[in-house]
Image: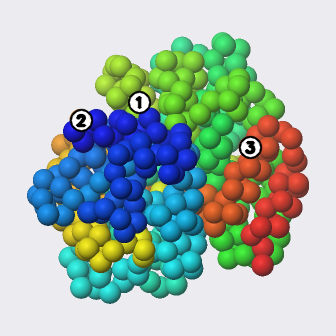
Amino acid sequence: MALSRRTLIGLAAGLPVSAALAACGSSGPGKSGGGATYWYLNGQPQESVRAGAVDAFNQAHPKEQIKDTTFQNDAYKTKIKTAIGAGQAPTIIWGWGGGTLRTYVEAGQVEDLTSWFDEHSEVKKRLFPSSFGAATVDGKIYAMPCETVQPIILYYNKKVFEQVGVKPPKSWDDIMALVPRFNAKGIAPFSLGGQSRWTNMMWLEFLFDRIGGPEVFQAIIEGEKNAWSNPDAITALAKVQELVKADGFVKGFSSITADSNADQALLYTGRAAMMLHGAWSYGIQQADGGDFVPGGGLGYMTFPPVEGGKGDPSDTVGNPAQYLSISSKASAEQKKIAKDYFTTGVLQDAEVKKWIDNGSVPIRLGTEKLLAASKSADFLQFTYDIASKARVFGQSWDQALSPTAAETLLDNIAKLFQLSISPQQFARNLNAVTGK
């Protein structure tokens, strides 16, 4: 029954909020109906882990039921914002923390969980300490960290590299030198689902860090006037356009979506040599790529340094965790169910094992032996080392900024990659929405 219901909801993901709720056949979010409601992202293999955790909780708590609804990534971002603004948020709000969470807090839309965590210190102590940064606003905790740590990783197809007779890049200059080598063989140097925009953003996140260090984006977060016009930022913006002009990305990248996993397929089928993507991509390639991953075809590395750059090569960017907040509009009963789910339903042993089996590193402490025993042990250790050894783990920009600023960011990133605006125009447009 649960799988059937989720399938119907998935089909409704392209509909307005009210239509999607009608399609799932439930009374919808908010105070109406019994039990708590929970929206999260679909797409395998992550969806089955999230759904399994809900099913396990529902089976163990027959009097405390959670009704879950799934959405595609890009659709979810629009729907959750609309629902919260209309006072129709689900009881449990899945998200990335950071700037978006801050807007919910400032609008009084989510519960302050600080005292709850004080009373349930055992819950907090079992999670990565670093995961609480993006859950905290002005010193108070408003979200439960969950799921996995997801640094951004540079993947490459080992067989394609062998075919062309080249080595993985150790610097930005190496990247630029590889581009014509792959193009000459009819292989796209980089896969990119550019229509989704946030995929393009990952390139800027690393270039800003490698060239100027984390201080460049920190100044933006703090609202420093004209922070986007920092000379190192302009250099980073110019470098990504140089890569576009050199045909560094697959032809038609602006019409490829990440939700479809078409960008992943380009890598594991050998039509693209490299791809910058999140740690979650490993599980997708493992599930969809046939013998690509088990056959040793997938390579991975951290983003290389830029010559003369100020950034520490150990720095990374991405998602320190995922986050669950509780709607302040939910009933007392729904809030209790949500908190019970946080205590006994999030990152229990079965869920932890599923994340590890999917090639992910859960944010629960004490999983080292499970990681080492996994068939994906090498990748998991690689991910664990990135997350634990990074001097700075920068949160994804579109989550660190407010939703309004993030939308302007993503819109201008698309234009930057399409070469329709210059680095200077990009900086001016972003300064207007982030500077105090």
Q: Quadrant of residue 289?
A: top left
Relative horizontal placement of residue 95, taking residue 184 as reference (left or right) = left
Kindly report which numbered mark, 1 or 3, lies closer to the viewer in this rendering.
3
Q: Amino acid at mark 3?
A: Ala
Judge the density around disc 1: few (<14), some (14-19), many (≥20) Cα neighbours within 10 Å: many
The number of numbered badges drawn on the structure is 3
Residue 80 placement (x, y as % from top left): 51, 57
Q: Earlier in the sequence, mark 2 or mark 3?
A: 2
Residue found at x 40% / y 33%: 284
Kindly tell me whether residue 265 is visible in this rendering.
yes
CB atoms of marks 1 and 2 within 8 Å: no
* Residue located at (79% from left, 62% from top): 430
Residue 165 seen: no
> In front of the other: label 1 or label 2?
1
Of badges 2 and 3, the one in the foreground is: 3
Residue pointed to by mark 3: 414
Q: Element at badge 1?
A: helix
Closer to us: 191 or 140: 140
Mark 1 vs mark 2: which is more N-terminal? 1
Q: Quadrant of the C terminus?
A: bottom right
Which quarter shows the N terminus? top left
Q: Nearer the viewer, residue 62 or 222?
A: 62
Residue type at mark 2: give it: Lys
- Residue 148 is situated, as x and y percent measured from the top left of the image, at 36, 54
Secondary structure at numbered mark 3: helix
Rendered image: mark on residue 375: 2
For the residues labelled 1 and 3, say whether their Cβ atoms are less than 8 Å apart: no
Alpha carbon separation for disc pair 2 and 3: 38 Å
Among the two numbered marks 1 and 3 on one chain, the one whose residue lies closer to the N terminus: 1
The mark found on residue 285 in the picture is 1
| Mark 1 to mark 2 CA distance (whole Å) | 14 Å
Q: Residue at x 63, y 63 (%)?
A: 403
